[in-house]
Amino acid sequence: MPSKVIRLMRDSKNAYPPQKAKKQNSKKVPWVDVSDDERDDRRRKTPLGVKANGHQPNGHPHPHSHHHQREQEGRNHKRHKKARHSMGTGAGLVEEWSTAGPSGSNGTAAALQEQRRNLPIAKGREALIQEIRNNDVTVLLGETGSGKTTQVPQYILESGLARTGMIAVTQPRRVAATSLAARVAAEKNEPSVGRLVGYAVRFDERAGAQTRIKYMTDGMIVRELLSDPLLSRYSVVVVDEAHERTLRTDLLLTNLKTIQRTRNGAGKDEAGTGKGKGKAENPLKIVIMSATLDAEKFSKFFNNAKILYVKGRQHPVKIYYSSEGQTDYVDSAMRTFFQVHTDQPPGDVLIFLPGQEDIESLEKSIKLFANQLPKDEMEVLICPMYAAQAPGQNAKVFAPTPSNSRKCILSTNIAETSITIPGVKYVIDTGMCKEKRYLARDTGGGFDTLLTKAITKSSAMQRAGRAGREGMGACFRLYTEDAFNNMALAPEPEIMRCSLTSSILQLKCLNQNLEELDLMDMPDVDSISSALKTLWLLDAINPNRELTPLGLQMALFPLEPIHARAVLASRENGCTLEVLDIISVLSASSKLFVDITEQRETAAEARRMFTHPSSDHLTILNAVRAYGEIVAGSAGKAARKDWCRKHFLNERTLLEASEIRVQLRQTCGRMGIDWKISCGDKEEPVVKSLAYGLAQNSAFLQPDGSYKQTMGQSVVKIHPSSVLCEKKVPAIVYDELIFTNQIYARGVSSVPKTVFAGIGALNRRIA
């Protein structure tokens, strides 16, 4: 029997058609409709010579589109409604956010509660709670701006559905988890995060015995399965942003399906509605939340679970397409921004870019030209936003825009759905994103490719919707309408394109085999085989694919398996202190060494004091030690920052690595490993320990001067950023392979060939 869609807001005009959901993407963008009064707006210049769906941006019809104009005006007249006033959900504030609302004006508890009552989802609160009460699994399709992420957990808590257990709310990104926890804590009138409302992300957790609502990354709750296979502490698990289909989300959904069957078995009838005669002692409720039109697939996965629909707060957004494709999207974004800035009414601008490098490049360009604007123009306040950035820097995005200023937010796709930024009226969409794809090798291992590629239709629609949260807005797409029509409907699930090594190791600890799981999408057989061979080479599993004692120890570390193996090897080699220093930096979210193309020679000279002649890893160790001496010398914050700047070091990475190191030391303590053991100035024990983890990431020098993999047939080159770039050594290990026009090894160290003789993995590899 097909799943039924329940509309929490009864509105026949805006009813959600369940059977036509997939077809909507193939038509015009749903936010293109423009009210009649906007048609008389003042003349505006056209960024990049774009066209606005048959109309020129100044409101005059295109010479060949009179008929289209009459049809469009007729449609707009029928759709014309009263303007809706946005209160803003504030569904995205950072840890430093305390009592101020997202716009800086709603600073009291009463104002926050009023804001909650005005959210679209509030109108269907009772119906929503009743449906969740009646069903074990609920799929909630909520448009952006409906308030589902912040309100649903609170509704569940306030209604008593969670009983005495916790409510877990999973997020694909750490910045979303921390931001949302801060917002909900403020709405619950909590003085700080970590009491009633908490969060857990990798290497950072603020939650205690009092915590009832816990925002966490999907990876963290999957790790909790290792210590609590039935997630017995949680009465309700809310899987948010499920449409992003991350690897951890897919694994979580599969395990939740099994866990619920076990925990709810006594109280569930054959249809799985939870209306059976028996009563489970600790039943589990599951709420799947998505912002795009793919709820049907989640419903079918959970045996035709009930689908609920919550309408969001979306004002009309006028879509502009580029008249031709843009080869340099960063330059095009800059020119479009300044045309918006000089010609459009006040309102913040949100620019979507693929990654951190593009954001930093565009930030410099905008600053350069903004300083040349006439004094009577509004000031430009640039606010970068990406996952690797410090939380304090991301906080600036949510601060109120000063008077006579326009905020320019440069963001990755993190601002598509996870984070809501108030004040945005204009969106500039480059149409590009970064996608990580792991190319598996049949010999085990493989290499990552981080490629810039076109976004999907669902992403384009989400980006455009950001301009219509608080009033009518505009979205400038730096690609043609044909390009939009040819986009894929949705991104490929991450489980189909990333390394499975770490996930398979965790599943082995749960006595599960990936190939036997009931997954929404099954990964490629070669990817599974490659991951299993990698774990075998690391001694994590035996030839029968069974978990070894060493593999279990590796899984206890919140690290990639290759790094966990190196830490365990350091115990035998007496250099745990040094290896933890190196691994903590490698596990940070951003690179330690700042690479500025035009200053590479200057940077190399400045870092000469801690550059090791034959090892990038020992260079990292020297840099960490040098920074530690600066900190120990009681240098002030400004002095430390200046020292890092002079030596082209990323202080944010060093600070993050320091926090990671604390957690790794605690983990070592629980496992009986003395993290204080040091090898002093000896180098071989450190390199040898790293080689145990990086055994499959090794290559030998060939007679022709090239390096050939020991675990494959590829010829690799040493990356230009390595200290070994211009040198030839008999054998190397490396952190990763990067594929551009050639295959480069990055993070390289010279290793004596004698070291490999003692590594069993190399002696046991399959021919």
Image (cartoon, rainbow, N blue to C red):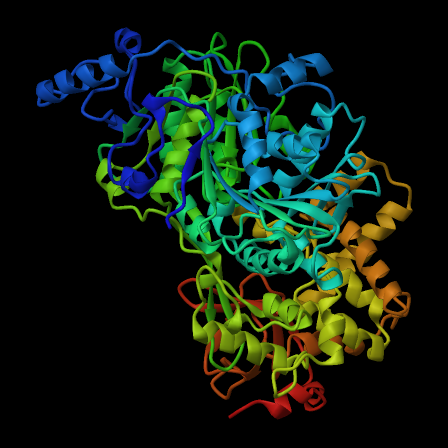
Which sits in the foreground, 193 or 477?
193
For residue 559, side relative to residue 125 (left or right): right
What is the x, y in percent for residue 107? Answer: 70, 14
Residue at the spot 54% in from the left edge and 83% down from the top edge: 711
Residue at the spot 57% in from the left edge and 9% down from the top edge: 403
Which sits in the foreground, 713 or 206?
206
The answer to which image quadrant residue 173 occupies is top right
For residue 301, side relative to residue 640 (left or right): left
> Does any portion of residue 698 appear in the rendered image?
no
What is the x, y in percent for residue 189? Answer: 76, 23
The answer to which image quadrant residue 171 occupies is top right
Which sits in the foreground, 593 or 304?
304
On screen, residue 451 above or below 598: below
What is the x, y in percent for residue 81? Answer: 33, 11
For residue 578, side relative to residue 243 (left or right): right
On screen, residue 523 above or below 609: below
What is the x, y in percent for residue 53? Answer: 22, 26
For residue 21, side relative to residue 592 (left or right): left
On screen, residue 708 above or below 12: below
> Does any portion of residue 630 appear in the rendered image?
yes
On screen, residue 289 above or below 369: below
Furthest residue toward front: 277
